[in-house]
Image (cartoon, helix red, strand yellow):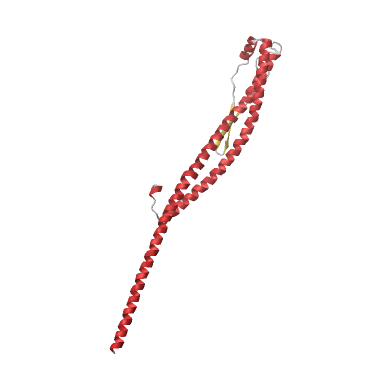
Amino acid sequence: MSMDSLAPTRMNMLLLKGQIKMASDGVGLLKGKRDALMQELLKRARELSEMRDDLHDKGRLAGNVMAMARAVRGTPELKSAAVAGRRDLHLSVESEKVWGLVLGRIDQKGIVRSPSQRGMGLLDTSAHVQEASECSEHMLAQLMVCAPLERNLQIVGEEVKKVSRRINALEEYLLPRLRGQMRAIASVLDEREREDTFRLKKIKGKKAVQKRKAQEKARAAQEAKEQAQ
């Protein structure tokens, strides 16, 4: 049965009261969840801001060192070092649950290598090239920290929006609708009660008139009998 076709009965009024209480409790729970998510969002936003600042610093340093190495040793030597140090990254992704949300992070161990692990000899490779490689790997390691943090921030932010939409739907649509229906039913029931009260008074009035007439008739008969005697 649709909510608009509810009959104006006390049973349906009690049903609406229960639904209003349930929806109001739901709003309270959702607001509590939204507050907790907002705190989580702000905490992660501050953490990401710090990590981004570190990433920008390492990126600028890597760019400057790379430019210096290119100026001193030339682009061919840098490309040769890049080919020698090419590899596949084996990353470990771990997850955690926060308020039902699956958030991840990347284990970036092993990204920053020693010169020998990059395929570079200490004697035949320029210090500028080694420094450029090391700074680039430090920047990559920091990027592996920032990337999941940014994605986690997006996930929490989207959940905050979703919870806010649910709260708005309850507060601005469902609860006003239920309360309006309850007021309408209460109005009909009050009108019925007034009609019943008026009807009862009218019936009592008729009975009182009939009783009075019966009493008057009996008294008149008694007086007539007494006069006849």
Is residue 106 shown left or right of residue 174?
right
Q: Is residue 120 visible?
A: no
- Identify the residue at the far left of this view: 228
92, above or below 218, in the image: above
Q: Nearer the viewer, residue 114 or 45?
A: 45
Which residue is drawn at the image coordinates 52% and 48% (left, top)? 25
- Identify the residue at the far front of this view: 227
- Identify the residue at the far bottom of this view: 229
102, above or below 109, in the image: below
Q: Name the spot of residue 32 as percent of width and height, x first.
A: 57, 44
Which residue is drawn at the image coordinates 29% and 85% (left, top)? 224
Q: Name the spot of residue 62 as percent of width and height, x first.
A: 66, 19
Q: Is residue 214 visible?
A: yes
Q: Name the spot of residue 138 as percent of width and height, x first.
A: 66, 22
Which picture quadrant has residue 197? bottom left
Which residue is drawn at the image coordinates 64% and 32% (left, top)? 47
